[in-house]
Image: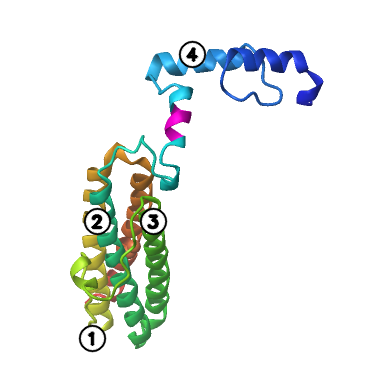
Amino acid sequence: METGDTPREEETVKATTTITAQPGSTASRVPRQEGIIKETIGLTDVKTLRAQARQGIEDGAMTAGYKGKVEMVIKLLNEALATEIVCVLRYKRHYFMASGINSLSVKGEFLQHATEEQVHADQLAERIVQLGGEPNFSPEGMLSRSHSEYVEGDSLVEMITEDLVAERIAIDSYREMITYVGTDDPTTCNLLEGILAQEEEHAEDLASLLKKLGP
Ligand SMILES: [Fe+2]
Ligand SMILES: [Fe+2]
C-alpha cells in the first residue's frame, strides 16, 4: 500500500511520534515502541540526539555520544597498524623465500596471511580516520611501534615458528585493547574482535603446519 493512499493515518503518526513513519506502519505501533525504549533503557530523547548531531558536524562519525578516550584509542590503533604492516612484510618475505619439498602448501598459507594482515591494516587505518586521527604509515619507527618483530628465519620451520610467535603476540595485544576499549567505543571494539578472531585462526593454521613438519 502506498503512503499517499492513507493520508489520515500518516497524519496521526506524525502527530504522535517524532520517529519517521514507514509505509505500512500503524499509528498505534510506533509510539508504543518509543515508550518501551525510553522506559527500559533511558535513551537520549530524539530532540536532543538531533541537536547533538548538528553540533560539530565537521567531526563526521565522532559525535558527542563518543565515550572513549579518543587520543589513546588512536594511539593504540596506530600501534596495531604498525604491527599489521610488519606482519605483512614478514609474511611476504617468508612467502618468497620458502623453498623445499614441503614449501608449496606453506607458501600458500604465508601469502593468504599476508593478504589478510593487509586487510586488517586497512581496516585499522580507516577507523583511525573516522576517529579524527591520522594513520601512521611512516617507515621511521615502524618496528618500535609494532608489537611483533620482523624475524626472517632460515628454514621453513623457523619461519613458521616466528610467524606463530608474532600471531600469539598479536592475539594478546588485541585482547588487551578490546578490554581497554570495552563498551566505550563499540565500533572499534567490534573491529578489534573481528581481527582477533582471524589472528587466532592464523595461529591455529601455523601450529598445525608445525605439527606436520615437526621432527
Ligand atoms: Fe592481522
Ligand atoms: Fe595474523
Taking depth in this image into account, of 213 and 187 the one nearest to the observer is 187
Mark 1 vs ligand 2: CB under 8 Å?
Answer: no
In primary-sequence order, the first of circles 1 and 2 is 2
Q: Tell me, yes or no, whether the highlighted magenta stretch contains residue 80.
A: no
Mark 2: give few (<14), some (14-19) or many (20+) Cα within 10 Å: some
Q: Residue at x 35, y 47 (%)?
A: 188
Q: Secondary structure at mark 4?
A: helix
Q: Quadrant of residue 51?
A: top left
Which residue carries the number 1 mark? 154
| Amino acid, disc 2 | Lys
- Compared to residue 204, the image places residue 38 above or below, namely above
- Compared to residue 74, the image places residue 57 above or below, namely above
In primary-sequence order, the first of circles 4 and 3 is 4
Which residue carries the number 2 mark? 75
| Amino acid, disc 3 | Val
- Quarter of the image for the N terminus: give it: top right
Query: Which span is picked out in magenta?
Result: 49-53
CA separation in Å, label 4 and label 1: 66 Å
Which label was assigned to residue 35? 4
Q: Are marks 4 and 1 in contact (CB under 8 Å)?
A: no
Which label was assigned to residue 129? 3
Q: Quadrant of residue 159?
A: bottom left
Label 4 or label 3, whichever lies nearer to me, is 3
Q: Are marks 3 and 1 in contact (CB under 8 Å)?
A: no
